[in-house]
Image (spheres, helix red, strand yellow):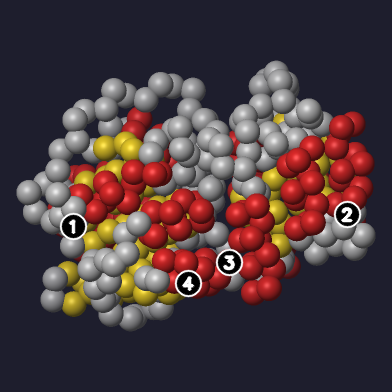
Amino acid sequence: MTGGGKNISSPVRVMVVDDSSIVRGFLTRFLETDPAIKVTASVPNGHAALQELDEAAPDVVILDLEMPVMDGITALPLLLAANPKLPVIVASTKTRENAALALKCLALGAIDCLGKPNVHDLADPGPFRDDLIQRVKTLGRLRGTPAGGVPFFSQETPPRVAEPPVISSHAPVALAICASTGGPLALLKVLGGLAPLSVPVFITQHMPAGFTTLLAENIAQTTGLDCREAVDGEAVEPSRVYVAPGNYHLTVAGTDGYRRIALTQSLPEHFCRPAADPMLRSLAASYGGSLLVAVLTGMGTDTVAGCRAVVDAGGAVVTQDAASSVVWGMPGAVVQAGLSAETVSIDNMAATLLRRLKVLP
């Protein structure tokens, strides 16, 4: 079995799989600007990736979807069958068809999806390069742990001992959910357990433009909830689920009398747009202590500053536990900061939220 058991101080070994030699070259150069990363194979299709897998011994694979000989969606289950511990990032052009394929790959065991670099990314490569490096290094540190739905654990410091959950006497009137790596499947599980719902739900999932459109449609079709990408200026309605569109931060303006969606293209935060922190800050200002937040699986520390604003305003934060997270980065960071009122498994998240929303006793 390849990829497991390496010394975590050694460089993260990456295999790049793309039929375009130009894209492979760009990705390789971007990655190898960091001395902690080494590209051990650069191949043009899934068949070549399978042939090179043992020799390249990658810790992370970046897998294109559209390729001759063997495409990414065919290669993915074969790669995971050969090495179930292999984190695979699927790379896709930002078209509707390919976004749908990328979401399917996440359901098949891919760990993350990445929008392929466009002209803007190549002209100003810094944000794309930094985001790519962060993802690869984070996933590379998780080598030797199973992929495809079995949890990774990325925190080196043990979490604080949880206090008994404190539940406010009044019911929250809005719910925010934040997620990144592993988030699409976690969102479906949680939201499927919340239907029907009487409060508005605001979601930031780290995803490129185009991908979030399909994510919202998938949530609506799978759960039966009224879920859509948020539209700038629209009024906030109860029982509606708003997904932050790719390349925009989702914020809410106004208070009790009238609230509306405000999409912004202010600077990315934590290499992300959408990011959770801008959403949470705006919701804390709008809803105060009447806001409930769930932080699901994901890498990085996005949500910590936003959750601090929520807690300072009197709201509550619930976090997904390490054992059920694909990457316990975002929820783990919130726990470490002492901002989580309760930490539960993904299987218990929906019931926990309903209890705090006063839907369940």
Disc 1 to disc 3: CB gap under 8 Å: no
The first of marks 1 and 2 along the sequence is 2
Q: CA distance from mark 4 to mark 1?
A: 23 Å
**Dot 4 crowding, Cα within 10 Å, few <14, some 14–19, many 20+:** few
- How far apart, in angstroms, are the residues tagged by discs 3 and 2? 23 Å
Secondary element type, mark 3: helix
Lower sequence index among marks 2 and 4: 2
| Dot 4: element | helix
Amino acid found under the numbered disc labelled 3: Phe
**Amino acid bearing label 4:** Gln
Q: Is residue 248 left or right of residue 63?
A: left
What label sits on residue 211 in the rendered view? 3
Kindly identify the amino acid type of the residue bearing the numbered disc 1: Val
Q: Residue at x 78, y 43 (%)?
A: 79
- Quarter of the figure with residue 80: top right
Disc 3 or 2, which lies upstream in sequence? 2
Q: Nearer the viewer, mark 4 or mark 3?
A: 4
Badge 1 marks a residue whose secondary structure is loop
* Distance between the alpha carbons at the discs numbered 2 and 4: 33 Å
Nearest to viewer (mark 1 / mark 3):
1
Left or right: residue 178 versus residue 38 is left
Look at mark 2 in the image and give the residue it sits on: 45
Front position in the image: 294 or 36: 294
Q: Mark 4 highlights which residue? A: 221
Q: Sort mark 3 into few (<14), some (14-19) or many (20+) by Cα contacts within 10 Å.
A: many
Say what secondary structure mark 2 lies in.
loop
For residue 359, which numbered disc appears in the image? 1
Q: Amino acid at mark 2?
A: Asn
Q: Which residue sits at x=35%, y=57%?
A: 193
Residue 125 picture location, percent across and down: 69, 55
Q: Residues within 10 Å of mark 1 (few under 14, many from 20)?
A: some
Distance between the alpha carbons at the discs numbered 1 and 2:
50 Å
